[in-house]
Structures are given as structure tokens and as C-alpha cells.
Amino acid sequence: MIEIKNLTKRYGQITAVNNLNFTVEKGEILGFLGPNGAGKSTTMKIITGYISSTEGSVKVNGYDIMENPREAKRSIGFLPEQPPLYLDMTVYDYLDFVSDLKSVDKKKKAGQIRDIMELVKIGDHKGRLIKNLSKGYKQRVGLAQALIGNPEVLILDEPTVGLDPKQIIEIRKLIKALGNEHTIILSSHILPEVSAVCERVVIINKGEIAAVDTPENLSKGLGDSSRLSITIAGPKPSIISSIKEIYGVKYVEAGAEREKDAFTYIVESDKNVDVRRPIFYAMAKAGYPIIELKSLSMSLEDIFLQLTTEEKEVEA
Amino acid sequence: MNAIFKKELKSYFYSPIAYVLIGLFLLVGSILFFVFNLASAYADTRWIFMNGIFILVLMIFSSVLTMRILAEDRKNGSEVLLLTSPVNIVSIVVGKYLAALVVFLIMTAITFVYPLITFAFDAQFTAEIIGGYIGFILLGASFLSVGVFASSLTENQVVAVITSFVMLLIMWIISGVSGYLGGTLAKVLNWISLLSRYDDFNRGILNFGSIVYYLSFIFVMLFLTVRVIEKRRWSQG
């Protein structure tokens, strides 16, 4: 549905996006993740044809955005970082204008606007001037605008920014529901959002792709060690030394005191070796009761940080 | 194009800007009408439109009328909507230009009251009046195209209005300079000197060349505007 090949954007000395390659399949919700300034917005602006790429091509629905902009743009709905609103218009007039702009059939127009307003829950505010709406409602009007014309592809640049937690959950649900009929690219720097909504994640850093995978695979497959959090009662030094002796353990660190004389230890071990049983027997033998044991899977957050900071070290 | 034209025209009348401009324009015109025609019992209303003050006012008003036309969209981000919808840049620019033109035409149409009043005092309807109006409309339409161009250069409306006004001012006074220069430069300066062809119309001469000149001037200005927007798509991040 969306095909991005060798996409590069330079302006002046700065390379904002460097040789990006990825495709998005029909009906997929793709998360576009990266720290601020990584090139997410730039990439989205290129995909939607707002700015031009220096090199490479973007095909949407089979149409090249540079060569057949009209056809390509017809199948895209775009919600930029700052919703493109006319503050002096009422919600309804604005959506009516957007419908005309996207040449929606005159007969279907009113019905479509009504349905979309219902969907994003702004029906009660249709007569209000956009400038008088709260940030959350402005964001919804922006989303409504992207949905006008029923485009097959939705490009949403940080759609939940500035919303309150309840609204965030609503919008996420809505995006997920929209994913049944639309192909969606969603950018964010909020990780739980991406793992909650997206089926696949592209992590981008400094204009380059750092990783592409499902959120689950990313949190499972990265790194070559697994981590445990164990709370054990007993003297700290001897516990640490006896855990260290166990085959497969790479690193032990004592954490906070959880109860009297019981500390939490973070144990990093080889991914292929299960150290939980050996630790249990060792502690039982030494007479130090294990109060709690749980495995820590790396959160997307850890992976994200790891990927984006590793990159820095390579460059430095 | 139609959608943009309609929306722009509406936005002129949703905000007070069109009413204020039309009102002030008519105020200045009416004062001149009173001084030149009513008070001095002189039938020829063309003097209003040939008067330097009125042309200066037209320059200011067309700059103000067009200052927000593209700059505002850039400033508040709605440019993204226009440029990512299935509409080409030419239609965006022309649609917006036509909206400003219609406001100007409304202003101008109302001034037709002045000759009508003189007819009531037995003044004769002459070809010069129509010629003068055609000239005035072409002149105003050209001023507006300069304003649209200036508005595409910046996202700051104040900068846009000043740029437009200074450009128009230069185009006005430049005909005087070209007389001293001669050669190709003089020809170029003469081409951008909008006022040098204006007087013909008021003499009742409908010079086909002059009409083509104004229309091509507008075309060039709008073309440059489209180029400016195109170019920015390449240079910005």
C-alpha cells in the first residue's frame, strides 16, 4: 500500500532523513517511533507530498507522490503535528470546505461529515468556531479532517499529543478501529501508545531506521541476556557472591531494601540458560529464603533507549 | 479551485476586513468625488480614478487585501491541508487571487454611483467612463497579483503588506527613472511600470496591447507565486 524506497531528505548541510526503506501492507497499523528530531515528521510530510524528497521515491496505492500527486493524495488523509485548522471557521464549515477540497461527491457530503463527526465525537460542537475549542477537540477536528473522503491511507503525526488520559485512550481505540478499514502510519515518541495500537514498529533515529519488527518481537528478541528481579532475605555480600558462582549468570546488582534484611537483586543471565532453579537451590542450601522472583522482559522503552543510544556511541 | 475561491471569499466577509476596506475605500473615493465633482460642479468623474491619492489608496488597500492570503496559511499550518489535498498549487493560488479580485470588483462597482450621480445632473455618458473603469480594474487586478506574490514570500503578514506596498510604490515611480536610462534596462523598467499604460484608458483609448500587458503582468506574478511555493517544498524540512 505504501512503498518507501531509498528516501533521503537533505536541506542545506543537514540530512534529515537518510536512505529510508520500508513498506506498509494494506490494513496494517504501522508505528513510527523515534526521539524528537529523528525525522518522523519529515518522512510523513514527504509521504503526503507536502515537501519533496531529495532522493528516493514514495508510492501510495501504486501512485508515485511526485509523478501522480493528485491520485496519490486522493488516497491519503493526513493529520500533521499541528492540526491544519482554520480557526475562524465553524467545525461544520471547515469539514465542508475540506470535503470540497477533496472533491467529495456533493450528494454524499453531508452524510459523510455527519458520520465522521459522530465517529470522533464532535457532533455537539459542529456550530462552534474552531478557535474556541479546547486542544483535545481541535485534535479531533484535525482527525475528522483526515478522515474526510474516506482515504485508504491515514498518516497521523503524534495524534494523541496534548490530550488528557481519557481522550488518549479514546483516540487510541478509535485508531485501532480505523485500522480495520484503513492502512495507518502513526508516529509517536510515546512507547506504550505504539505497543498498544500498532502491529509493526519502525524505530527511526537520526533519520535512519534502527529497527523494524512487531512490538512483541522487539521486546523479546533484543539483546542476548534475560533479566530477573529477585528479592531474597539474608546478608547482601554472601548472596551476591553465591549467585555469581552459578553458571550462566553474567551480572548481579543489589537494589533497594524491600523488607527488613531482604533486598531486591537484578540478575542478568545468558539468554539460553535458565538460572531460576539453580538460584533457588543455592539460596535454599544457604538458608536465604527467596521472597519474590520475577523475570523482567525488556520493555519497548528499554529497547528504544538501547537502540537510540547505541547509535550515538557508534557515531562518536 | 472552486472550493478555495468560495472559502476565501467567505472568509473576507466573515471577518471585518472586507467591510472595513470597502468602507474606507468608498470614503476616500467619496471625498474626492465631492471635491472634484460636486463642490466644483464638474461632471467628469475620471479625475477621481486618475488622482494620485486614489491610486496610492488602491496600492495600500490591495496590499492589505492580499497580505494574509498565503502568509496566514503558512503561519497557522493550514498550508499543509491545501498542499496535501488533491488540488494543484496553481488552483490554490488562482482561487485565492480570484477571491481577492471579487472583493476589489465589489468596491469598484459601488464607485459607479459617482458617474450615476453626475448623470442626474445631466452629465453625458461617455466611452471614457467605461474605458476608465476597465483601466482601473486592470490596474487593481495587477496590484492584487503583486500582493499575492508578496504574501507567498513570508509567513508574517506585516512583512507581506510592507513588501507588497514597497514593490507597488517602486513600480509606480520607476517610469520616471527609466526616462533617464535608455537601452534594455529602460525597457525592462518600463515593462514593470504599471502606471505608464494606465492613462490611455482614461482618455477613452482601449489599447489592446495595454490590456494584454496587464493580463500578462498578472500571469507572471501568479506564476512567480506558484514557483515560490513549489520551491519551498524542496528547501524546507
Image: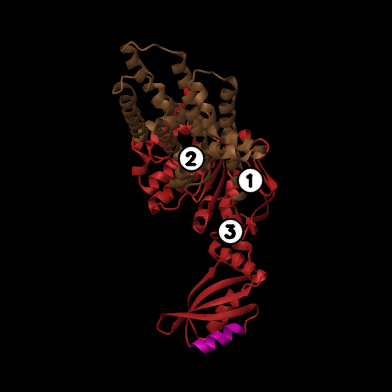
Chain colours: A red, B brown
Magenta segment: A235-244
Secondary structure under tag 3 reads loop
Residue A18, by quadrant, is bottom right
* Distance (Cα) linking label 3 and label 1: 18 Å
Which residue is the extreme one toward the left?
B39
Magenta span contains residue A307: no
Percent position (x, y) of residue A113?
A: 44, 31
Q: Amino acid at mark 3?
A: Ala
Magenta-colored stretch includes residue A236? yes
Location of residue A299 in the rendering, given as x and y in whole percent from the top left corner = 54, 64
Q: Which of the chains bears the disc numbered 1?
A: A
Looking at the image, residue B127 lies above or below residue A252: above
Question: Of tags 2 and 1, which is closer to the observer?
Answer: 2
Label 2 environment density (alpha carbons within 10 Å; few <14, some 14–19, many ≥20): some
Q: Which residue is mark 1?
A: A52
Tell me how far mark 2 sits from mark 1, CA to CA: 36 Å
The x and y percentages for residue B107 are 39, 26
Labels 3 and 1 positioned on one and the same chain: yes
Q: Are marks 2 and 1 on the same chain?
A: no
The chain that hosts pointer 2 is B
Residue at which label 3 appears: A38
Specify the quadrant of the image occupied by residue A116.
Answer: top left
Q: Which residue is mark 2?
A: B169
| Quadrant of the image occupied by residue B30 | top left
**Side (left or right) of B212 relative to B163:** right
For the point 31% across and 19% down, which residue is it? B41
